[in-house]
């Protein structure tokens, strides 16, 4: 009996150690399979192509509307705003066509059987198309934010200091300001070509951006800090200018000035400020995730604490760049939907619905009141 117990216990111990050894051997294999599935690059370019097509279509429609409006308001103060808005939509259109074509080409070329090794090789040594795509991401990312800030500052001057605005703001100076904005964004985008920062392939291997995930150096951190600081500063300045313009228009509305020409000008100002607020809110929602995730991942990568959360930040960066792409789709819709003609139609429909509900409520009260009067008369008779 004792020998049987010894043999049974030794068999149990041996089988237990064998199962542990098998689990320890299989565990790295399972982790490798999971990691390979997690970092496998998508081969379906349909979402990217659909996003590119929608962006081109919406921006072309907005450009047509803006061109007609610019010809109608060529000699008015709104012409400057329309010139800025047309430049914004044209920049968004180019930001869809050029990077979108590069992304689709990377989808078509990224067909290797081992996506992990290909992605790591491209990250270590990006090609010319990757460098150009990274520069386009920075350039077409900063331009809409700079233009939105310039539009907000121009409207703030037009609302608060109309005489100064009429004297200083001209079509020639507006075109000069647009040129300076594009040159500033271009200067920032080409900094990595002068060894200040670097562009690299980003997960899942279909787009390129600033090196913020692996091997981040001090120059990379400085470059992403500059990019994020300029973008957030533009959003903050636009918020301040739009707030001042909105408060000024509300005060003018409360004073109820009787001059019809001044009221017409105020209605145009209100329309433009509403559009600017819509553009600002859209830019904040769409660009803030990529800016915050990029800066956070660069800081953690530079400090050496990103390795444990590398897959999480890769997913966050993909989400951020998708939301940033949506900004170029939504910008034209902000202008199309927030025009004065559309807002008037929405106001009339809402007013009709409210008046219909009010008339229905009054008719119900009118039908109930005779019944209440007859009931009171019968009670008085009793």
Image: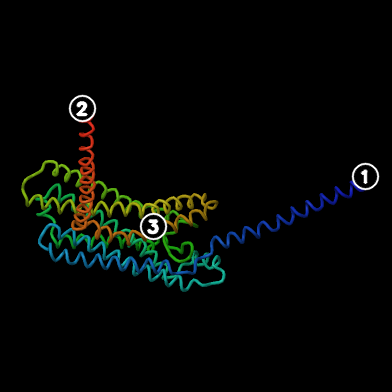
Q: Position of residue 108 (x, y in %)?
A: 46, 73
Q: Residue at x 37, y 52 (%)?
A: 288
Neighbor class of circle 1 (other Cα within 10 Å; few <14, some 14-19, many 20+) is: few
Image position of 381 with respect to 153: above or below: above
| Secondary structure beneath label 2 | helix
Which comes before the other along the chain, label 3 or label 1?
1
Residue of label 1: 2
Residue of label 3: 323
Q: Position of residue 198 (x, y in %)?
A: 42, 61
Residue of label 2: 381
Q: Viewer-proximal residue, 179 or 4?
A: 4
Q: State the CA–CA distance, disc 3 to disc 2.
A: 74 Å
Image position of 15 with respect to 53: above or below: above
Q: Quadrant of residue 72?
A: bottom left
| Secondary structure beneath label 3 | helix
Q: Residue at x 10, y 62 (%)?
A: 75
Q: Residue at x 67, y 56 (%)?
A: 27
Residue 255: image tag: none
């Amino acid at each position: 009996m004792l020998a049987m117990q010894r043999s049974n216990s030794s068999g149990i111990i041996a089988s237990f150690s064998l199962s542990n050894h098998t689990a320890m051997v299989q565990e790295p294999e399972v982790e490798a399979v999971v990691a390979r599935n997690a970092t496998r690059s998508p081969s379906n370019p349909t979402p990217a192509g659909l996003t590119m097509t929608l962006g081109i279509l919406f921006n072309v429609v907005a450009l047509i509307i803006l061109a007609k409006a610019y010809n109608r308001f060529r000699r008015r103060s709104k012409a400057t705003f329309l010139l800025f808005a047309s430049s914004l939509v044209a920049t968004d259109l180019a930001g869809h066509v050029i990077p979108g074509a590069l992304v689709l080409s990377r989808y078509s070329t990224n067909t290797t059987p081992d996506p992990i090794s290909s992605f790591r090789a491209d990250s270590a040594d990006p090609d010319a198309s990757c460098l150009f795509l990274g520069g386009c991401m920075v350039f077409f990312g900063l331009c809409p934010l700079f233009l939105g800030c310039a539009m907000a500052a121009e409207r703030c001057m037009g609302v608060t200091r109309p005489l100064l605005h009429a004297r200083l703001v001209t079509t020639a100076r507006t075109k000069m300001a647009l040129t300076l904005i594009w040159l500033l964004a271009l200067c920032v985008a080409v900094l990595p070509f002068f060894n200040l920062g670097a562009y690299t392939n980003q997960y899942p291997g279909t787009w390129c951006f600033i090196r913020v995930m692996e091997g981040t150096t001090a120059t990379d951190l400085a470059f992403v800090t500059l990019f994020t600081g300029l973008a957030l500063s533009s959003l903050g300045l636009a918020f301040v200018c739009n707030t001042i313009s909105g408060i000024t228009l509300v005060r003018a509305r409360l004073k109820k000035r009787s001059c019809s020409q001044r009221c017409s000008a105020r209605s145009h100002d209100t329309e433009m400020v509403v559009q600017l607020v819509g553009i600002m809110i859209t830019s904040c929602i769409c660009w803030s995730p990529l800016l915050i995730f990029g800066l956070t991942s660069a800081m953690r990568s530079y400090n050496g604490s990103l390795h444990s959360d590398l897959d999480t930040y890769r997913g966050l960066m993909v989400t951020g760049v998708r939301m940033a792409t949506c900004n170029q789709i939504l910008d034209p819709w902000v202008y199309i939907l927030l025009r004065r003609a559309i807002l008037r139609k929405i106001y009339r429909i809402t007013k009709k619905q409210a008046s219909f509900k009010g008339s229905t409520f009054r008719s119900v009260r009118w039908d109930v009141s005779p019944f209440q009067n007859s009931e009171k008369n019968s009670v008085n008779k009793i």
